Amino acid sequence: MISNSLEETKNIAHKFASTLVGGDVVFLEGDLGAGKTSFVQGVLEALGYTEPVRSPTFSIMNMYLIANHPTIERVIHLDFYRFESPREVHSLGLEEMMENKKNVFMIEWPKNGIENGSDIRYTRSIKFRSVNEQTREILIS
C-alpha cells in the first residue's frame, strides 16, 4: 500500500486493526521516521484508545489498556532500536506476557532484540519504506 500522508497511514492502520486478535505479535520494520509509531497510533485509535500514544524508543515498552474489545485487553508497544543484544529482551519478561492471549504486541526494530530460534514469533510483519518526505510504502504480510 502507498500512503501519502499521516492521515492515510492511520487509515491503513485502522483497516489493519480490524484484523487483529488477542495473541497477535506484529513486527514493524523500517528506517527511522518511516511511520512505524504513527501506524501504531492509528491501530490504537481504531481499537478505541483515546489517550496520547508515544514512541517507546526511550521507555522500551508502553502498554495500552483496551476497553470493550472481545479478544484484546492490552496492546504492548515495544521498540528494540537501542538494544545491542537479544539477551536484553529476556529482562522484559515478554515470554510471560505472551502467555496472556488477550495481549497484542507491536514490536519496532524486532531484529535488534529477537534472535533466530527465539520463542518470540510474529504473526504479522509490516515493512515501511520512505519513498520521499511524504510518501510511504507499507507492506503487510
Image (tube, rainbow, N blue to C red):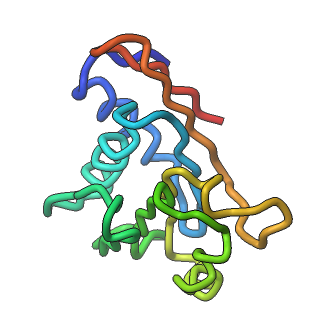
**Residue at screen point 40% across, 69% down:** 60
- Quadrant in the rendering for residue 33: top left
> Relative to 50, is 75 on the left or the right?
right
- The x and y percentages for residue 96 are 61, 88
Quick one: quadrant of the C terminus? top right
Residue at the front extreme, as displayed: 84
- Quadrant in the rendering for residue 53: bottom left
> Relative to 9, is 117 on the left or the right?
right
Residue at the right extreme, as displayed: 117
- The x and y percentages for residue 112 are 61, 56
**Residue at screen point 63% across, 82% down:** 90
Count of numbered labels shown in the rendering: 0
- Taking depth in this image into account, of 126 and 43 the one nearest to the observer is 126
**Residue at screen point 28% across, 73% down:** 67
**Residue at screen point 36% across, 18% down:** 3
- Quadrant in the rendering for residue 70: bottom left
Image position of 127 with respect to 27: above or below? above
- Taking depth in this image into account, of 51 and 15 the one nearest to the observer is 51
- Taking depth in this image into account, of 99 and 55 the one nearest to the observer is 55
Image position of 70 with respect to 26: above or below? below
- The x and y percentages for residue 9 are 33, 29
Image position of 36 with respect to 113: above or below? above
- The x and y percentages for residue 50 are 15, 60
Residue at the left extreme, as displayed: 51
Image position of 93 with respect to 89: above or below? below
> Relative to 1, is 55 on the left or the right?
left
